[in-house]
Amino acid sequence: MGLANRNRSINNQLKGKTMSLLKRLSMTAAFATASMFASFAHAVPTVFFGENLNPGGSVSGNPVSARNLFLSNLSGGVGNQTFETFATGTASPLALSFPGSTGSITATLNGNGQVLNSPGAGRFNTTAGGSKFWEMSGSFSIDFSDPIAAFGFYGTDIGDFNGQVTLELSGGGTTNLTVSNTVNANNGSLLFFGFIDPSQTYTKITFGNTASGTDFFGFDDMVIGDLQQVRQVPIPGTVALLGLGLAGLFAARRRKQ
């Protein structure tokens, strides 16, 4: 009986130590999971980017695919600013308006630039059936009446004078993004750049250029969305067209095989 009691005591001690270890492991896993979700909640915006270095003055190729993918993550009610209602030569400030989830979102564009209605020096309109666009000749900013979580645009002729476009997102937090356009690119290139940030909203976007004053570019078909207009949450921090490129590569390999 004494031996049996000792064995029972040893088993109980082992069981207690095992349960304690499992509890600590469970707490560690819970902490790691919580940390992971916290990291996700404060992740950088998802960026959508596509570039066509030789569009020939037309809207085609990767920029169109990137824009379509960007729009697929937003509700159908988002607005698109085409600059068609402004007179040629109009300078800032420009008063803009977009449909939000609960009413109109107004925006004010300030800075260096003007509205043009004809192609020139590689810049061109990107709106189907339109003719106008905003030409940037330096830094400019856009202030929004309500917080936004999504923003996108077509850019033309970016980078042919060694410039790279930057965006500072502010209001409720500050995030800096750099458009990964090709530096010293061909004249007349086309790109789409957009972001969606379901964890942070912004009330101002400031555009800069590493070659400000020399690397002019065209800006058109600007889309914004508030948090309620984000239809699905994309994977944070990914460049959307990377997945499309890999899919195309795998498809090409299958065709070869």
Image (cartoon, grey):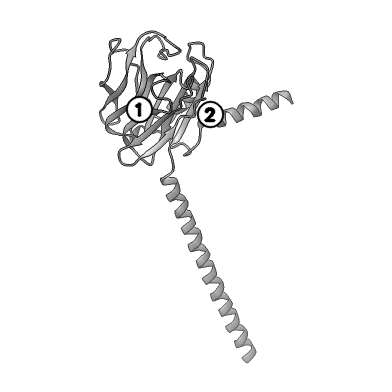
Q: Quadrant of the C terminus?
A: top right
Task: Tell me the residue at 35%/32% (across/down).
Answer: 229
Relative to 250, is 5 above or below? below
- The picture places residue 44, in percent across and down from the top left corner, at 43, 40
Looking at this view, is 107 or 41 the one in front? 107
Residue 168 falls in which quadrant of the image? top left
- The picture places residue 207, in percent across and down from the top left corner, at 37, 28
Residue 35 in the figure: left or right of residue 143? right
Residue 189 in the figure: left or right of residue 145? right
How many numbered tags mark residues here?
2
User: Do the residues bearing badges 2 and 1 touch, measured as CB atoms within 8 Å?
Assistant: no
Task: Tell me the residue at 54%/75% (across/down).
Answer: 16
- The picture places residue 112, in percent across and down from the top left corner, at 32, 21
Q: Identify the mark nearer the N-term, 2 or 1.
A: 1
Q: Amino acid at mark 2?
A: Leu
Task: Tell me the residue at 65%/26% (across/down).
Answer: 251
Residue 3 falls in which quadrant of the image? bottom right
Residue named by callout 2 = 241
Q: CA distance from mark 2 to mark 1?
A: 20 Å
Residue farthest right in this picture: 257
- The picture places residue 1, in percent across and down from the top left corner, at 63, 91
